Image (cartoon, grey):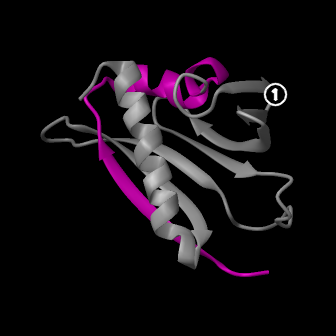
């Protein structure tokens, strides 16, 4: 199996960490911007886009701070170390809020993956009324 490349991107967002956390940690919040529909049963989340469905396991969540998911069903070994994490970062001095995305992609698809996140985060900003 081809090794994937880890990447991180930062998106400044004008919203409170508490509000943001609702949008990154709950099925109803995630379905507002990340996927067309999101269902969860315990730590198993199902993300639905048009005709495709992907399942992910919620690995960790820290209230008001971050969520970390691992995709299932995509041929990755259950023990693989690939995941995606959405972390809320607050600058201690300026109190500016950013979303930090950590994800993995095939090396030749990193730019594409970053663009996808870019589009999804701009949907999130639109939902939040944040520019």
x, y percentage for residue 122? 37, 36
Q: Residues within 10 Å of mark 1 (few under 14, many from 20)?
A: few
Above or below, 103 against 40 in this view is: below
Q: Is residue 18 in view from this perspective?
A: no
Front-most of residues 77 and 95:
77
Above or below, 52 against 26 in this view is: below
Image quadrant for the N terminus?
A: bottom right
Q: Check residue 13 for magenta coloring.
A: yes
The residue where tag 1 is placed is: 42
x, y percentage for residue 48? 73, 33
Q: Name the residue at 51% across, 25% down.
A: 23
Numbered disc 1: secondary structure: loop
Question: Exactly how many numbered labels are in the figure?
Answer: 1
In the displayed orientation, state which residue is furthest to the front: 51
Q: Which residues are magenta?
A: 1-30
Q: Is residue 58 left or right of residue 16?
A: right
């Amino acid at each position: 199996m081809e090794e994937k490349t880890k990447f991180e991107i930062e998106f400044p967002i004008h919203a409170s960490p508490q509000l943001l956390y609702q949008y990154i940690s709950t099925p109803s919040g995630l379905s507002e911007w990340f996927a067309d529909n999101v269902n969860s049963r315990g730590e198993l989340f199902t993300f639905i886009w048009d005709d495709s469905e992907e399942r992910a396991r919620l690995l960790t969540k820290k209230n008001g701070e971050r969520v970390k998911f691992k995709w299932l069903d995509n041929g990755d070994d259950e023990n693989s170390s690939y995941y995606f994490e959405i972390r809320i970062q607050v600058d201690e001095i300026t109190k500016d809020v950013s979303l930090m995305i950590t994800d993995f992609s095939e090396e030749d698809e990193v730019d594409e993956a970053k663009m996808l996140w870019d589009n999804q985060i701009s949907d999130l900003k639109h939902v939040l009324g944040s520019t």
